[in-house]
């Protein structure tokens, strides 16, 4: 049986760990603080679809677990580099790393054609430490669609969605990808394997790169951003810039810009995660969601003036 560790067992990590454990898969989690203490005392409790599921995954320090077969990283992108000392003991030469994060991941250029092959994206890996500790060749891409929250320490409320899209950076179909996909499916989740995982990354990033920073700057919810002609136009311009950058690196978009904006409007009075983090005094994921896009735009020579301006303003806003 595969050794699976969920690193950063917050809302999404807790959802996955609880589902896997409930399905009979042996799972270890690395958590901290009151959340860890509650799980150790009472188990990891998942509220989903009217059910209350209590599971007891192994809670441990990474150093005590040693190298794993699979490590599912469910941190926010800006939390990965500070967590490397805790992650390193889990990673051996045969470990598969699943990057369940938003935005442009550190491994993105692995397998791209020259001159971009394995080029480091400094916005998400400033020193190269992430790439060195978490080798892109050992990494599976993962696009996360469920929404969940920690109601209280040890208790996860799963509100909607069950899809974790997986894919190898080089587009091949491998045993390691099929094994973890089957485990997630057996746990009641959807885990399709995609030959073009970067396309899926961009479909989600497309809205996040615009709506998250705009909401952080204005305090507006998605319905207000999309209904207002001014902020809607800014979002549209940013998304058009992002699409041009993505396509220059070979990504394809399966939906058009208007449908993506309409989808955001349909979500309603929702505060983006970036706005919520700002309100709570937490670091924001501006570099993975927008900084990386602007950096890559410079590589391919595509002007992104609106995105560059919004990036500068949001970085300044985050320093308050």
Image (tube, helix red, strand yellow):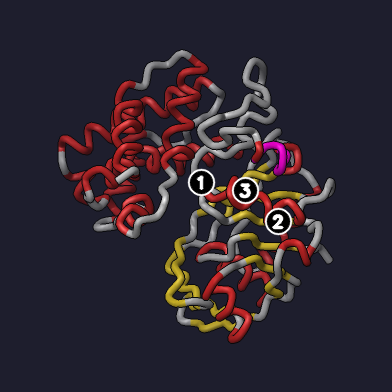
- How many angstroms separate mark 1 from mark 2 (CA)? 18 Å
Let me know if residue 96 is in the magenta part.
no
Horizontal relation, residue 296 to residue 2: left or right = left
Q: Secondary structure at mark 1?
A: helix
Task: Tell whether 67 sits left or right of 58.
Answer: right
Foreground: disc 3 or disc 1: 1
The mark lying in front, picked from 1 and 2, is 1
Q: Nearer the viewer, residue 42 or 190?
A: 42
Q: Are marks 3 and 1 in contact (CB under 8 Å)?
A: no
Q: Position of residue 138 (x, y in %)?
A: 75, 42
- 180 in relation to 33, above or below: above
The front one of 134 and 205 is 134
Q: Earlier in the sequence, mark 3 or mark 1?
A: 1
Q: Residue placed at 75% from the left, 37% from the top?
A: 137
Mark closer to the chain start, 1 or 2: 2
| Residue corresponding to mark 1 | 78
Q: Residue at x 52, y 75 (%)?
A: 34
Q: From which residue to which does the magenta span run?
A: 130-135
Q: What's the mark number on residue 99? A: 3
What is the x, y in percent for residue 266?
A: 29, 53
Q: Quadrant of the N terminus?
A: bottom right
User: To which residue does mark 2 refer?
Assistant: 71
What's the magenta bit mostly, secondary-structure-wise?
helix
Q: Position of residue 131 (x, y in %)?
A: 67, 37
């Amino acid at each position: 049986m595969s050794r699976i560790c969920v690193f950063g067992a917050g809302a999404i990590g807790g959802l996955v760990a609880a589902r896997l454990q409930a399905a009979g898969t042996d799972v270890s989690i690395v958590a901290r603080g009151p959340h860890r203490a509650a799980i150790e005392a009472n188990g990891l409790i998942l509220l989903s679809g009217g059910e209350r599921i209590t599971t007891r995954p192994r809670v441990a320090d990474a150093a005590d677990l040693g190298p794993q077969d699979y490590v599912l990283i469910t941190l926010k992108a800006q939390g990965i580099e500070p967590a490397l000392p805790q992650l390193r003991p889990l990673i051996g030469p045969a470990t598969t790393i699943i990057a369940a994060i938003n935005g442009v991941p550190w491994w993105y250029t692995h397998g791209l054609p020259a001159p971009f092959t394995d080029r480091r994206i400094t916005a998400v890996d400033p020193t190269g430490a992430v790439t060195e500790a978490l080798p892109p060749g050992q990494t599976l891409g993962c696009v996360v669609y469920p929404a969940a929250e920690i109601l209280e320490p040890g208790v996860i409320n799963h509100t909607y969605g069950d899809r974790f899209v997986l894919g190898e950076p080089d587009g091949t179909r491998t045993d390691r990808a099929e094994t973890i996909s089957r485990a997630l499916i057996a746990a009641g989740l959807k885990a399709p394997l995609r030959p073009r995982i970067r396309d899926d990354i961009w479909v989600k990033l497309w809205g996040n790169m615009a709506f998250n920073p705009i909401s952080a700057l204005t305090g507006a919810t998605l319905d207000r951003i999309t209904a207002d002609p001014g902020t809607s136009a800014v979002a549209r311009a940013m998304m058009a810039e992002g699409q041009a950058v993505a396509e220059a690196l070979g990504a394809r978009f399966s939906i058009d810009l208007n449908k993506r904006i309409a989808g955001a409007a349909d979500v309603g009075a929702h505060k983006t995660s970036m706005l919520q983090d700002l309100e709570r005094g937490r670091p924001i994921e501006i570099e993975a969601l927008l900084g990386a896009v602007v950096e890559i735009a410079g590589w391919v020579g595509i002007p992104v003036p609106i995105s560059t301006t919004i990036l500068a303003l949001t970085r300044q806003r985050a320093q308050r």
